[in-house]
Image: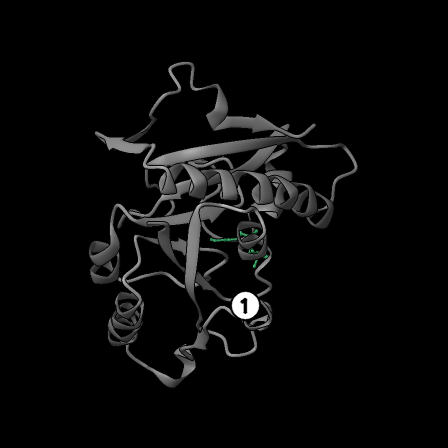
């Protein structure tokens, strides 16, 4: 039986698209957005994937909104919930409900640059290597167990936009890979760290721009 996946997104949805097109052993059973206008919803509908908006601006209470969202997700009986550019902080109760089956992608080499504006901050710090991270979500924002990372060299003439574009290309490689590993049952969390079963060298959990 293939792995049932629910995707949450807020905007463009290019990571969702990369996952949907990667021919993974998964069934994307629903796409949910907190923004009705999210391009990712339109793409889902084009592919015949059920897509719904849960507009957070119609709810003042974050915890109550997250409870409704969690109920909607549970209805689809997912094995995995994928955050693909879902730009809202999730309540502790929501995270507890899905912990161990909740993945996120973040546009930095965590634990560096959690939060927003990661590319601007990387350039401001003068780091020479930047990248992205797929991790399990825990109550500790942007600090959950790391599944895979990809690095890109920072160029002298990079702007936040050029750097973001090159990091995004890597996001589109590593997120489908992480989802594949999850679906294949190869990810094991042990004391806050992810072990990739069958990869004693850990070579495949790190990649670089080519
Ligand atoms: C991606 O760069 C993702 O890493 C980032 O939002 C973008 C969504 O793009 N996520 C975060 O910053 C989460 N804190 P997409 O909608 O095209 O996938």
Q: Is residue 127 visible?
A: no
Q: Which colour scheme appears in the figure?
A: one colour
85 displayed left or right of 146: right
- The quarter holding residue 208 reads top right
Q: Secondary structure at mark 1?
A: helix
Q: Is residue 109 visible?
A: yes
What residue is drawn where x is 33% and y is 25%? 197
User: Residue 91 location in percent, x, y?
Assistant: 27, 62
Q: Which residue is mark 1?
A: 44
Instruction: Look at the numbered disc 1 and say if its residue's Cβ is closer than 8 Å to ligand 1.
Output: no
Q: Residues within 10 Å of mark 1 (few under 14, many from 20)?
A: many
**Placement of 138 over or under 196, stated as above or below:** below
- The quarter holding residue 162 reads top right
What residue is drawn where x is 60% and y is 56%? 14
What residue is drawn where x is 58% and y is 52%? 21
Q: Residue furthest top?
A: 201
């Amino acid at each position: 039986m293939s792995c049932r996946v629910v995707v949450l997104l807020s905007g463009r949805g290019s990571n969702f698209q990369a996952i949907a097109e990667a021919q993974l052993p998964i069934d994307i059973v629903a796409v949910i957005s907190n923004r009705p206008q999210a391009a990712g919803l339109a793409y889902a509908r084009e592919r015949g994937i059920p897509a719904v908006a849960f507009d957070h601006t119609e709810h003042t209470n974050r915890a109550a909104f997250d409870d409704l969202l969690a109920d909607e997700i549970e209805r689809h009986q997912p094995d995995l919930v994928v955050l693909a550019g879902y730009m809202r902080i999730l309540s502790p109760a929501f995270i507890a409900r899905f912990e161990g089956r909740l993945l996120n992608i973040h546009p930095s080499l965590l634990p560096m640059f959690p939060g927003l504006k990661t590319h601007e901050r990387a350039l401001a710090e003068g780091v020479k290597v930047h990248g992205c991270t797929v991790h399990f979500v825990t109550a500790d924002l942007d600090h959950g167990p790391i599944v895979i990372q990809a690095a890109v060299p920072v160029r002298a003439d990079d702007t936040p936009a050029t750097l973001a574009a090159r990091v995004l290309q890597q996001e589109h490689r590593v997120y489908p890979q992480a989802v594949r590993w999850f679906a294949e049952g190869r990810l094991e969390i042990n004391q806050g760290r992810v072990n990739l079963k069958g990869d004693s060298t850990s070579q495949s959990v790190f990649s670089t721009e080519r």
